[in-house]
Image (cartoon, rainbow, N blue to C red):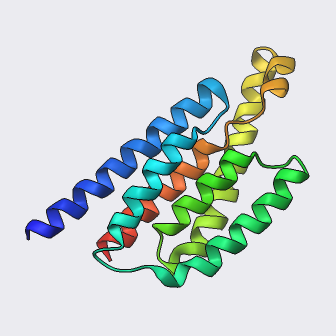
Amino acid sequence: MYNLDIYFFIVILALILLAKMAFSDIKTRQVRHRDLLCLTFLLICLWLKSPNVSVLPYTLMILGVGFLLHILRVLGAGDTKLLCVISLGVSPQYLSLLLYGTVFVGGAFAVAYLLYGYTTDIQKIRARGVPYAVPIAMVGGPLILLTYIS
């Protein structure tokens, strides 16, 4: 029972860190490397309970596709790195849910953000872009928790 409490505490810390990263992305449009490293460390610590090494090829594919999306200026580099780090904490059976959920929630978030821009200052909104770490964290956090529970 004692070990489960430690792992649950690690999951809670990871969820808090994801929330911090989402709010930081809203304010500055940046995902900090320090936060990504801390999240990576926390998720690797969860591997002590159940090693998740089978997810590594998928993580590398996410990194490759994310790099291409970054070159095409569709997705920011920090968002790509965040998605890769979150994939380290998600079971391979939930990876498609992570990706599709992120696309769906991210699209809804982008539409809502665009509508917000039309009611305020659309030029300012377009210049700053969409803080995509928010939908990534909204989908990734619960899936990390679901992976820990199952």
Query: Quadrant of the image for the N terminus?
Result: bottom left
In percent of width and height, residue 2 lies at 8, 66
Quarter-wise, where is residue 62 in the image? bottom right
Vertical side of 110 occupied by 29: above or below:
above
- The structure residue drawn at horizontal position 70% and vertical position 58%, both measured from the top left corner, is 103
Q: Residue furthest bottom?
A: 54
Q: Say left or right for 21 vs 75.
A: left
Position in image of residue 19 (x %, y %): 45, 40
Q: Quadrant of residue 122?
A: top right
Residue nearest the observer in this picture, 117 or 50: 50
| Residue 64 placement (x, y as % from top left) | 77, 67
Q: Position of residue 38 (x, y in %)?
A: 43, 48
- Quarter of the image with the C terminus is bottom left
Q: Is residue 50 left or right of residue 116?
A: left
Taking the spot 67% from the left edge, 46% from the top edge, the residue there is: 78
Labels in figure, total: 0
Identity of the residue drawn at 41% across and 57% down:
41
Q: Is residue 2 above or below residue 52?
A: above
Task: Judge left or right: residue 52 versus residue 135.
Answer: left
Q: Residue at x 69, y 54 (%)?
A: 80
- Residue with the most extreme top position: 120
The residue lying furthest to the right in this view is 72
Q: Taking 21 as reference, is 55 above or below it?
A: below
117 on left or right of 147 = right
